[in-house]
Amino acid sequence: MRTAVVLFTRDLRVHDNPALAEACERAETVIPLYVLDPKLGGLSANRSRFLHQSLADLRGQLRERGGDLVVRTGDPVAETIRLAREHEAGAIHVAADVSGYARRRERRLAGERDLRVHPGVTVVDPGALRPGGGGECYKVFTPYYRSWSQATWRQQASTPDRITLPEGVDPGRLPDIPDGESPHAAEGGETLGHRRLSAWLLSIDAYADGHDDMPGDRTSRLSPYLRWGCLSPLSVAEAARARNAEAFVRQLCWRDFYYQVTRVFPKLSTEPLRPAGDRGWRYDEDALRHWQDGLTGVPVVDAGMRQLRAEGWMHNRARLITAAFLTKHLGVDWRLGLDWFFRWLIDGDVPNNSGNWQWVAGTGNDSRPHRRFNPIRQALRFDPEGVYVRRYVPELKGIDGPAVHQPWRLPGTERRGLDYPGPLESQRDEAVWLRP
Ligand SMILES: Cc1cc2nc3c(=O)[nH]c(=O)nc-3n(C[C@H](O)[C@H](O)[C@H](O)COP(=O)(O)OP(=O)(O)OC[C@H]3O[C@@H](n4cnc5c(N)ncnc54)[C@H](O)[C@@H]3O)c2cc1C
């Protein structure tokens, strides 16, 4: 075959990219394409910035190999077909994805050209594993993890040495990198993703014991690079497995788990998986705003919410605490929290954000949906000296040691964190201190 188009979506890399590798093996000339879809203009400023940084890096990687990233703006399907026709491309290669949007794109492309859909967004294909007793996907994590661990993983795809564009293709201009909202957000791109991965692998042994250490910040921070495909999840999982870092590999399995759920329940961000858990939410704008602003008066919750704004990222333990505080303590609808996370997270995506919010809210895949987190007890356990809280809540910098976890008075009001109604009140005897 003379020419093939590779439509990049959220696989913004040249290493272990099966779509790119196969196109380069089979065709003489290849058009690597990214289509900026104005309909996705709603992408948050933080994610838009990370995306554009990643596209600039991808263009650099492709140019180093003699090719280029061809950039168009418009409907991705129409633009892909137009380019394929102009250059008489016989095949279009794309990575399989699980969202409704991605699957509509695949269906429309398949009607036009020889469409080759490739793995690469997850470690194991989302449709590959089915529970024994029937059902289209696993709804409980542990059996999925067992089956996922025993599955044969695909071979990594080779990285093309050379990419040849057909004559006369206008590469198009990449727009300037837009501003994000979070001053300390990580920067995008495959090059930085590899750098972070290499550094991370040096300390991966500490993950099993250290991943909940909030001030120690001992998780990989690879999530945005995985979300945008700057890193191949398979290559990350294999590198971790080679170092026997099973606790870390298990977290990558959680990622795959939510993808296979989303494949079957594409409305995961709006509809409860377990409708019985989706009742009686409060719509308290005041409480929601305090939560969003990091002004609930519960220090560890406020620290997490401020980390989110500052970095476009939040420690997993803080995500659990803040999401549980909103849903189980304030009783506010999980969809409002999910939207707020989407606005700020650079790693925000439908499967992981929605799956985790539903897990915490008790509408999703948690086998103990009535589980509660006491934020103060969590704080004392995972930030025992209050270092994490003081890092993000400057108002509390003067308070030494664990005393910083006591609820604080909201500026300008008589209200303190625990003055909100909610089940935490009944847990006072367990760990909650009230300042005299
Ligand atoms: C309410 C809530 C919302 C979340 N929203 C997102 C989201 O939008 N995008 C996202 O990638 N993760 C989300 N997570 C999961 C998790 O918090 C992040 O993946 C993790 O904090 C990213 O940091 P890391 O890369 O340092 O993780 P590490 O601990 O180093 O883990 C390695 C990788 O495993 C995956 N992973 C880890 N924990 C989970 C998990 N619970 N579920 C799914 N995958 C996981 C991620 O890809 C992560 O990069 C959410 C968790 C909660 C509780």
Image (cartoon, grey):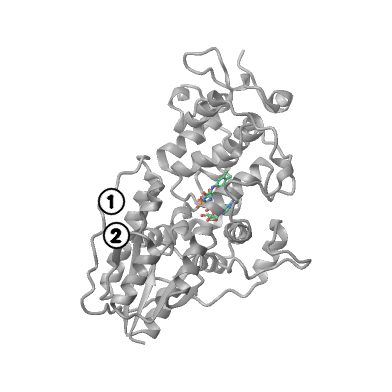
Q: Amino acid at mark 2?
A: Ala
Task: Give the residue drawn at x 66%, y 69%.
Answer: 129
What is the x, y in percent for residue 266? 59, 56
What is the x, y in percent for residue 227? 47, 56
Label 2: few (<14), some (14–19) or many (≥20) C-alpha neighbours in 10 Å: some
Q: Amino acid at mark 1?
A: Ile
Residue 88: image quadrant is: bottom left
Residue identifier under label 2: 56
Please, what secondary structure does the residue beneath circle 2 have? helix
For the question of whether residue 183 can be seen, the reply is: yes
Q: Nearer the viewer, residue 126 or 2?
A: 2
Q: Nearer the viewer, residue 70 or 234?
A: 70
- Viewed as shown, does residue 415 lie left or right of 49? right
Q: Is residue 291 above or below residue 252?
A: above
Task: Give the quadrant of the N terminus.
Answer: bottom left
What is the x, y in percent for residue 173? 23, 60
Task: Of the two numbered discs 1 and 2 on the same chain, state the one appearing first in sequence.
Answer: 2
Residue 125: image quadrant is: bottom right
What is the x, y in percent for residue 50? 37, 52
Q: Are marks 1 and 2 in contact (CB under 8 Å)?
A: yes
Q: Nearer the viewer, residue 41 or 330?
A: 41
For this orientation, the residue located farthest to the right is: 133
3D distance between C-alphas at marks 1 and 2: 9 Å
Q: Nearer the viewer, residue 213 or 222?
A: 222
Residue identifier under label 1: 177
Q: Is mark 1 within 8 Å of ligand 1?
A: no
For the question of whether residue 369 can be seen, the reply is: no
